């Protein structure tokens, strides 16, 4: 794998070239450059896989170089060389796609090789995936199922391709019907799997929805047609059960649509499915929906109740805000407005409330706040009950202390952010300050001092609060026993967990669980 070194200091370039035996580890130094402009010429004329670049350089700095490289090739690994006072630049570099950073004062052979090997693995994996996807897409494009799916989607959106579809799907004596799958993208089976059976086409209607199209003979009796449609829907449902077998809590459903004797019936079938999802949202959240849906009134959204809720939030009245939110949700339940509009309305409402509680002195980067990030879940919640539970919990959390500390959230220090991210992702493991420092690539003592100075608490105190906050969430769900929760959030025994929990929360885990049932 070819590596290019970019730094305006000759001593740094020499140091990097001689720090490791590049060939021994499967790397090849193809060149070096003293600034971004010179490096860009290398990238344009040579097959460069990894660029190790300084940030502050004359002519063209490292950040601009990264932008230019990404515009030329999107599969180049980028590593940043930084000094201790380059925190703002490192943060910007990470946003531009840098895989990692190397601290100049702390450069060691083992650390450099470890970072390079991580980048190489990521590049190899991305390139394999890209090749496989390109091959699969080419095969799919050549298939009849893919062509039909594209024609159907264009027809439903614009009315185009009608003549082709009539010939392909509705020849003399044939009709069609659709089976809808609605699920999170990670739960949905690949399109080629759904298209491998007797289906005629699989439409990727949206990120969370697939429409599997089947055909039937119009000479079938009503009973035979029902059996044909029901059997096809059951096969799709069985396929989804297998695909979602490891996702017990995933919300997904399969809906059987109406028979369509002619192409003009497709828009009616689309509306039919939308009504099925509307009834499921306010009714029983079945995973296999075959009943014909009724109609529903286009009820208004509760804008007045929302104004009352936001007024309570703006005044800092937590109890009133909780009560107003409950009233707003009850109005939605009674009126049953359009489910998609409800999700957008609720998302917007919580976003406004979030801004009111954070104010000007709040979180600088919203994407670093787990509460803010959790709001995206609203768009995928398929039933009113979990939506109401989510809103109630989110409203209570608006005033809660974020578990990674406001000081940490406001920090521009990439080492602090990287340490907190590692703790969030690995709190359930037996980790300590040494593991965190090793991940961040600083000495334990230096990181501990830096963290305490920036956040006002130690690494272990923050890690403990992350664990306790996650334990509170699990206790509220009531799905695990206390000793199971203790182990799942990284405590070695239930007694130390209970003692720590009471010290930080003010009650025992059992008392907390009872209060939130």
Image: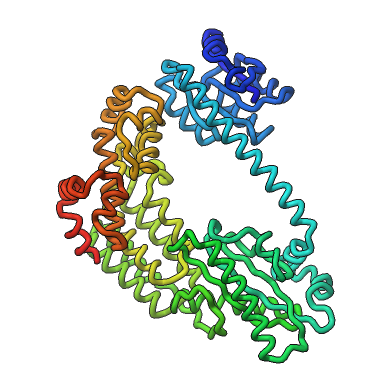
Q: Nearer the viewer, residue 142 or 68?
A: 142
Q: State whether residue 469 is above or below residue 244.
A: above
Quadrant for the C terminus in the image: bottom left
Display coloring: rainbow
**Residue 251 placement, left or right of 167:** left
**Residue 25 picture quarter:** top right
**Residue 507 placement, left or right of 76:** left
The residue at 57%/12% (across/down) is 17
Q: State whether residue 93 is above or below residue 505.
A: above
From the top left corner, tell me how far across and down residue 369 is, in percent.
38, 46
From the top left corner, tell me how far across and down residue 101 is, in percent.
48, 26
From the top left corner, tell me how far across and down residue 343 is, in percent.
46, 66
From the top left corner, tell me how far across and down residue 197 is, in percent.
70, 67
The residue at 57%/70% (across/down) is 238
Tell me if residue 311 can be seen: no
Tell me if residue 497 can be seen: yes
The residue at 64%/25% (across/down) is 1
**Residue 120 placement, left or right of 307:** right
């Amino acid at each position: 794998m070819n590596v290019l070194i970019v730094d305006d200091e000759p001593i740094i370039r020499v140091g990097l070239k001689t720090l490791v035996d590049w060939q021994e580890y499967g790397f090849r130094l193809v060149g070096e450059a003293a600034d971004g402009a010179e490096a860009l010429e290398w990238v344009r004329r040579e097959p460069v896989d990894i660029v190790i670049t300084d940030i502050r350089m004359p002519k063209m700095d490292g950040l601009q170089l990264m932008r230019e490289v990404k515009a030329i090739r999107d599969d180049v690994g980028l590593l940043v060389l930084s000094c201790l006072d380059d925190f703002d630049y490192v943060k910007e570099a990470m946003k531009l796609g840098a895989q990692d950073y190397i601290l100049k004062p702390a450069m060691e052979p083992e650390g450099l090789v470890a970072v390079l090997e991580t980048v190489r693995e990521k590049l190899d994996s991305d390139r394999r995936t890209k090749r496989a996807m390109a091959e699969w897409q080419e095969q799919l494009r050549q298939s009849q199922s893919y062509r039909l799916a594209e024609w159907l989607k264009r027809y439903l959106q614009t009315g185009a391709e009608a003549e082709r579809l009539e010939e392909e799907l509705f020849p003399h004596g044939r009709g069609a019907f659709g089976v809808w799958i609605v699920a999170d993208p990670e739960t949905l089976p690949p399109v080629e799997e759904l298209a491998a059976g007797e289906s005629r086409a699989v439409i990727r209607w949206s990120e969370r929805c697939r429409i599997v199209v089947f055909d039937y003979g119009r000479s079938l009796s009503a009973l035979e047609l029902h059996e044909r449609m029901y059997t096809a829907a059951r096969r799709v449902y069985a396929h989804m059960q297998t695909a979602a077998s490891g996702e017990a809590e995933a919300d997904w459903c399969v809906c059987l649509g109406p028979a369509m004797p002619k192409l003009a019936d497709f828009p009616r079938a689309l509306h039919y499915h939308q009504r099925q999802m509307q009834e499921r949202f306010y009714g029983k959240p079945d995973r296999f929906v075959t009943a014909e849906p009724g109609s529903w009134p286009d009820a208004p959204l509760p804008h007045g109740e929302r104004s009352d809720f936001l007024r309570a939030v703006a005044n800092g009245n937590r109890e009133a805000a909780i009560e107003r939110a409950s009233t707003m949700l009850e109005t939605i339940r009674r009126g049953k407005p359009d489910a998609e509009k409800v999700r957008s309305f609720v998302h917007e409402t919580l976003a406004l409330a979030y801004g009111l509680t954070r104010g000007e002195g709040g979180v600088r980067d919203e994407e670093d706040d787990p509460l803010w990030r959790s709001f995206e879940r609203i768009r995928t919640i398929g039933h009113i009950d979990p939506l109401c539970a989510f809103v109630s919990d989110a409203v209570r959390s608006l005033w809660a202390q974020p578990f990674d500390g406001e000081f940490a959230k406001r920090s521009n220090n990439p080492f602090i952010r990287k340490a907190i991210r590692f703790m969030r992702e690995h709190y359930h493991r037996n980790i300590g300050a040494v593991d965190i420092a090793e991940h961040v690539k600083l000495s334990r003592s230096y990181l501990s001092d830096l963290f305490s100075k920036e956040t006002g608490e130690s690494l272990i105190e923050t890690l403990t609060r992350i664990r306790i906050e996650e334990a509170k969430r699990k206790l509220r769900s009531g799905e695990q026993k206390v000793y199971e929760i203790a182990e799942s959030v990284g405590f070695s025994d239930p007694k130390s967990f209970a003692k720590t929990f009471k010290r930080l929360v003010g009650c025992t885990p059992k008392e907390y669980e009872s209060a939130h049932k």
